[in-house]
Image (tube, grey):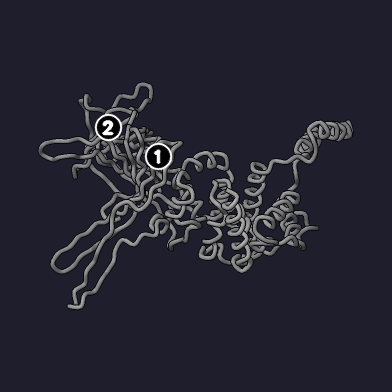
Amino acid sequence: MAGKRDLLTRVEFTGYWWIDAESERNVAGVFTYDPQEGCTLALHGDLWEQPDGEIPPILRGLSSSGDKITLLNCLVLRNKLRSGSFNVVELACHIALIGNYYPDESLMFRKSSVRFTNLDDWIFARYVEMKPRKNGDLVFSVKRGRQATLKCSAGGYEARLIGEFRANANSLGAEVSAGTELYVVAKKPQELAWHLSEIESINDLASLVFAAPTFLLSVSMYGETKRSERFGSQTEKVSAFFYRDGLRPPARSVYPLIALKRLQIVSPDILSVWREASDRFREVIDLVILILGQHHKTVGAGFLLSMQAFEAFDRLVHPEQLVSDDDFKVVSDAMIRAIPPGTQIRLRDKMKAAIQYANEPSLRNRLTSLHKRIAEQYAPEALGFKKSSLELLVKTRNYLTHYPEALKPFILSEDKMAEETDRMCLIILLSIFDELRVSPLEILRAVFLHNRFRRFVGELEESILKKQQESGGSQEQKR
């Protein structure tokens, strides 16, 4: 929103810097935040003695425009002599808090606020309405206030989505901007690291919901509320600046797989469930978001990542052994003894390692089981996931892993690889939401509108949704 400090814009503050309130020394310097480089500080002089090379954990500054700045976790980049008169010390800073000073390292905040890409699309709120009158006047109305709330009983906080606006008007014109701010409101004050961790977690959930990376736009922290006779109640507030890798907001909006207000109804404590599931499926989620963010340069790399994500997820949710441990030990011991005594050590070690994992299903077995589950849960060959394609998926994965020339005529084309990659991402997302206790039916309703997955709608007949609704109704009757 207009007037807010954000993580997309380069800012620079010139001022004076010191270590703490008791410090008698301060030096001039320039603080810079750059979205591509993070936070840096150039000090025009030595601020502290460095007998052991240690740096104070917190630095404070006052800019020429009156901004109070707190810098955390600084690291010296270079120390060089300038004009023979004083040193220029260049530092990198992990986090910068603009707006207030803090006395020690245990920075406590009662709430934080955040905006990230697609947040307004997730809430589906209409903030500004325009109504023409009969006399020719034009009336604008702007909505504000709480739009939705997600609770996290496990984390002891609420995520409140508040509609806010800013307006600037004169006799000739007016500018109005409105949008959603997400507030993380804790039951008791929490440390800075806690707030940043929960913000990151909610942002990851949003990326999963949109099936596209969402990027932080702004982060603010709120401390104590103080009262004074002259100024009334005032809350300590700081804007947080820190480096974000791969900060590339999308050029267009993305449709969510489930609207936030709907998620609030079907799973009001989703953030608690997400806390546990995100730790369990961390690698799988990262792989899927990596694919959806198109960080890979070739379709083959994306296809391999999707197969890796599927196998990782399947091992966690559907652990299976081909035979019992005792039976497998008999077979594996016999296979190891069968290796000729004169076999080269490297080959012997490789064969032993391969035998250790021979008791789990192959990719072919896992895909066959997945095909059966999808047919039982939705409909035969739903989402275009056909039995005839399973062998092609296996051969393509094997070719891209080992490049045997004999398989090359039987692998998928690049267009088909891209299609199967997206299909597998959708299947994994549906499965993850199922683990989050959000019915896949809720997600399937939005697949028809999702830019990336709508191509699978032709294979998704109405009978699937009807089947889901009927099974849901029968379960309600049993209750």
Of mark 2 and mark 1, the one earlier in the sequence is 2
Name the spot of residue 430 as percent of width and height, x first.
Answer: 58, 53
Q: Amino acid at mark 1?
A: Leu
Name the spot of residue 349 as percent of width and height, x first.
Answer: 78, 34
* The N terminus - image quarter: bottom left
Q: Amino acid at mark 2?
A: Tyr
Disc ID at residue 196: 1
Question: Is residue 294 in sight in this rendering?
Answer: no
Q: Are marks 2 and 1 in contact (CB under 8 Å)?
A: no
The residues tagged by marks 2 and 1 sit, at their Cα atoms, a distance apart of 17 Å
Residue drawn where x is 11% and y is 36% of the image: 229
Nearest to the observer: residue 470 or residue 478:
478
Q: Would residue 351 be found to the left or right of residue 229 on screen?
A: right
- The answer to which image quadrant residue 387 occupies is bottom right
In the rendered image of this protein, does residue 169 appear above or below residue 18? below
In the rendered image of this protein, does residue 190 appear above or below residue 398? above
Name the spot of residue 287 as percent of width and height, x first.
Answer: 57, 48
Q: Would residue 127 be found to the left or right of residue 384 on screen?
A: left
In the rendered image of this protein, does residue 386 appear above or below residue 289? below
Q: Would residue 311 be found to the left or right of residue 341 on screen?
A: left
Residue drawn where x is 74% and y is 54% of the image: 394
Question: Is residue 388 in sight in this rendering?
Answer: yes
Secondary structure at badge 2 equals loop
Residue drawn where x is 49% and y is 40% of the image: 275
User: Which residue has dot 2 on it?
Assistant: 102
